[in-house]
Every structure is written in structure tokens, then in C-alpha cells.
Amino acid sequence: MFATAPPLDEHPGPGRAPDPADLPVAIGELRKRRRAVILAHYYQEPEIQDIADYTGDSLELSRRAVETDAEVIVFCGVHFMAETAKILNPSRLVLLPDLEAGCSLAESCPPEAFASFRARYPDHLVVSYINTSAAIKAQSDLICTSSNAVDLVRQLPEDQPILFAPDRNLGRWVQQQSGRPMVFWPGSCIVHETFSETAVLALKQAHPEAAVIAHPECRENLLDLADFIGSTSRLLSHSRSADAPAFIVLTEPGILHQMRRSVPGKTFLEAPGLDGCSCNACPHMRRNTMAKLWRCLETLEPRIELPEDLRQRALAPIQRMLAMSR
Ligand code: 13P
Ligand code: SF4
């Protein structure tokens, strides 16, 4: 399907971005010309999710990054996701529309401080959430995502002590579900820490028919209110299969676009942040826009690059995860 595309280095450089209304067609044409695949996380703007070749959670998108035969992977998500794609598929050009799209959770775990923390627990197996930099992955024994964390930890020997990083909320939930001994790096996500228990209780009272569904990065008092807890794709599939006619959704509101599209007959309510703020939108994810997506396909920048020795050390625990994931 890409037989007539020019070589990757023959690109014309930055031109004027098309008008917003013309961006979907312009992006579609460039995607073909560049032999590119567009992967989008569920927290991206609706227009980006709609134009993507694949949408998914972190685990699904990592698998897509391994399987693709496209020459260019445009990762509409945050830096650690695009970096994971590059670690898994280094021969591909991996682009992130905005290189500044980071992750508060990944940033809450600096490599030097983590190395000192880890040294205090020499008998512990290091299980790290995929929301980490390559430098943290390289210090880990096993990577997990919110969709497979409980299952992977249950596969470890029952008496194996575990150091879980960097999200203490996800870690606590995995510990409860698996009953495995754990110590936690004290990190968290600014978005999932923001949900207000009082506001969710008020929403529940106003909508008694609604089920509460939550991402495991939420604080424990919020998870205690949830009828179902899971990764973004699990929340999406649960909203399809559960009987409830309405859902109060405790995660980044980008996912509501897929929920409303896939189950149009049900009602989806965004859980507000503390004091009604709109800080439940991930500021990092929202850095990517349609115009930046167009520009990165046009210029083939910004690219994700990392030293080969670091890539290989970060690859081993990700491959272990993929091998253990069912
Ligand atoms: P998922 O893997 O559940 O999509 O989560 C990624 C993430 O960054 C949640 O904040
Ligand atoms: Fe990171 Fe939180 Fe944004 Fe997810 S929602 S990408 S964990 S900052």
C-alpha cells in the first residue's frame, strides 16, 4: 500500500499549516506519503482519536508499536509512550507531535533518587509502571501497565517482596488485589489525584442510577467509591457490557469520547476535580493538537531518540511484560 511513497529523507520542510477544517484530509494524505501509522491514546483530543489508525490504552498501543510495518510511528500520547514504542521498534522513526508532552507520574521518579531508593531493598523485585522514563525501566525487573499489573504480580512467587514504582495509588490497589508484599515509591499523577470525594458523592446522589468507574491511579478514598476499577480500555469495555444506564467516570475525560461513540444510548458523567476545577484534563496529553500532528508528519520532527545501551536495558523488562501478558 505504500509502494509509491518517496524515501523518508526527501521531505519538503515546514510549510504553512492548512486551515483547521482541512487538517483531517491533509493529515490523511501525509500519513500515506510518509508510510506512517498514527497511534492515539484515549486521553487525546476527539479529533486526534478519530483520525488515528489505532486508539488504545498503554498496553494495546505498545503491542501496535511492535506489530506495525509502517516506517513512521506517530505517537499521539505522552513522551514515555512514544519512548516505549522506540524501545520496542528501534528501526522505525518515532514521532511525538509535541516533545514537551511529559507525564507527572514519570517525572515524580528521577533516576538517581530511584537508584538510591532501590539500593535499600536489595531482595525486592522491581516492578515499574510503564509510566516511567527509559532510565527507570532500565533499573526495573518487570514493567506493567494498569491493564495487566494485577495479573503479572499474581504470577510472581507468593513470598517475593516487590518494590512497586512510581504510582503509589496503583501500587496499593495491586497489593490489595494480589495480596503480595510491596513497598512503594511515593509518586502519583496530578490528574488522578485531583478528583474530589465530595463532588463524586454529590454526583452519585444526583444520579443514583449511575455506576462509578475509576482508573487505579485515583486515590484510595475515591477507589473505595468505585463499582469497577480498571485501565482506560477496561473502563471502556465495562461501560459497554455493564447493565448500568449511566456512569460517573473517574479518569481523564478524553476517554468519554470513545465511551459516547461506542455506547451512544448510555450517559457518561465527567467527575469534577477539587473545587470544580477542570484540572482532570491531562495538561501533557492535551499538548498534542491536530496542527502539531500535521506538522510532525510534514517535517518528520520531533523524533524520539535514545542511546542504544539504554534502549537495550529498558527493553528487557518490557519484553518480560509482553511475554507474561495474556
Ligand atoms: P492506561 O494504560 O490505562 O491507558 O493509562 C495510561 C495513563 O497514563 C493513565 O493516566
Ligand atoms: Fe501521566 Fe497522569 Fe497524564 Fe496519565 S493522566 S499521562 S499518568 S500525568
Image (cartoon, rainbow, N blue to C red):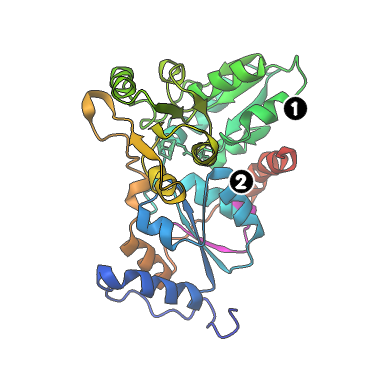
Give percent across and percent down for residue 268. 37, 38
Q: CA distance from mark 2 to mark 1?
A: 27 Å
Front-most of residues 154 and 121: 154
First of labels 2, 1 by sequence position: 1
Q: Provide residue 103's location: percent of width, then percent of height.
A: 42, 39
Q: Which residues are magenta?
A: 87-96
Amino acid at circle 1: Gln
Q: Where is ligand 2, by quadrant? A: top left
Tell me if residue 219 can be seen: yes
Query: What is the x, y in percent for residue 68?
Result: 63, 62
Q: Residues within 10 Å of mark 1 (few under 14, many from 20)?
A: few
Q: Which residue is mark 1?
A: 155
State the mark number for residue 310.
Answer: 2
Mark 2: secondary structure: helix
**Is 31 rendered above or below residue 115?**
below
- Dividing the picture into quadrants, the one containing residue 289 is bottom left
Q: Residues within 10 Å of mark 2 (few under 14, many from 20)?
A: some
Front-lying residue, 153 or 255? 255
Task: Name the kind of residue labelled 2 in the image.
Answer: Leu
Identity of the residue drawn at 59% across and 31% down: 128
Vertical order, 191 against 172 (above or below)? below
Relative to 179, does residue 17 appear above or below in the rendering? below
Q: Nearer the viewer, residue 323 or 114?
A: 323
Which residue is more in the foreground, 322 or 119? 322
Tag 1 secondary structure: loop
Tell me residue 221's x, y (percent).
Answer: 41, 15
Whether ligand 2 has any atom under 8 Å from the Cβ at mark 2 is answered as no
Does any atom of ligand 1 lie closer than 8 Å to the CB of label 1?
A: no
Q: Which quarter of the figure is the C terminus placed in?
A: top right
Mark on residue 43? none
Extreme residue in the bottom direction: 4
